[in-house]
Image: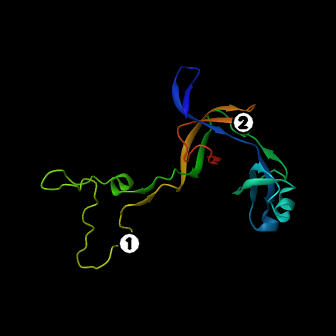
Amino acid sequence: MTQFYSQEGIVSPATILIALPNTVTDVRTQERDGYTAVQLAAFEKSIKNTSKAVLGHTGGKAFETTKEFRVEETELKKGDTIAVNIFTPGEIISATGISKGKGFQGVVKRHGFKGGPRSHGQKHSEREPGSIGGGLRSRVPQGMRMAGRMGGDRITVRNLTVLAVDTENGFLLVKGAVPGKRGDSIEIRSV
């Protein structure tokens, strides 16, 4: 993340996204497939460990990720490239990615529990969950909020504003934060 100064001198928190060109590997049609969609692939890789079936589908190129997006109608054809210049400054977008994994966490960090008081004879129970309501049953109710693994979920952040577009270097400057750590791939959609 960084700061972005507008022409009026207003500073905004911003995230720099590297928007590599995406290649159209297939176009699904209503007549052939029963729905309309565009299949995009990104991050070219070595073709050494790629099967011939995949190479035939992608036109002899190997990609790290392939994703299909449903659309109403499209004029794209197989082999076309989508670059960062489809976005304009001021446009509202949504970003979807996998959030940072935080490992095994307690109830205070994971669910925002208050914890117990330090007084009244409690020695080491400030961050413990307390009672889980065991009356009239001999099991833990489903969905009980407890300690456990936190993060690593698919998150969508909506209503992000595009601050600037650098078509020469393939950078997209977005106001605010996006989910995931450095190097993760993010899906960006126009709202």
Give the labeled residue for mark 1.
Answer: 142
Q: Position of residue 106 (x, y in %)?
A: 36, 57
Residue that protrudes farthest toward the left in the picture: 120
Closer to the camera in the image, 170 or 60: 60
Residue at x 17%, y 56% (from the top left corner): 122
Closer to the camera in the image, 188 or 28: 188
Q: Position of residue 54 (x, y in %)?
A: 81, 62
Which quadrant holds the N terminus?
Answer: top right
Compared to residue 120, the image places residue 164 above or below, namely above
Sequence-earlier tag: 2 or 1: 1
- In this rendering, position of residue 119 left or right of residue 182: left
Closer to the camera in the image, 97 or 124: 124
* Callout 2 amino acid: Gly
Q: Position of residue 52 (x, y in %)?
A: 86, 63
- Place residue 149 in its image quadrant: bottom left
Give the labeled residue for mark 2.
Answer: 170
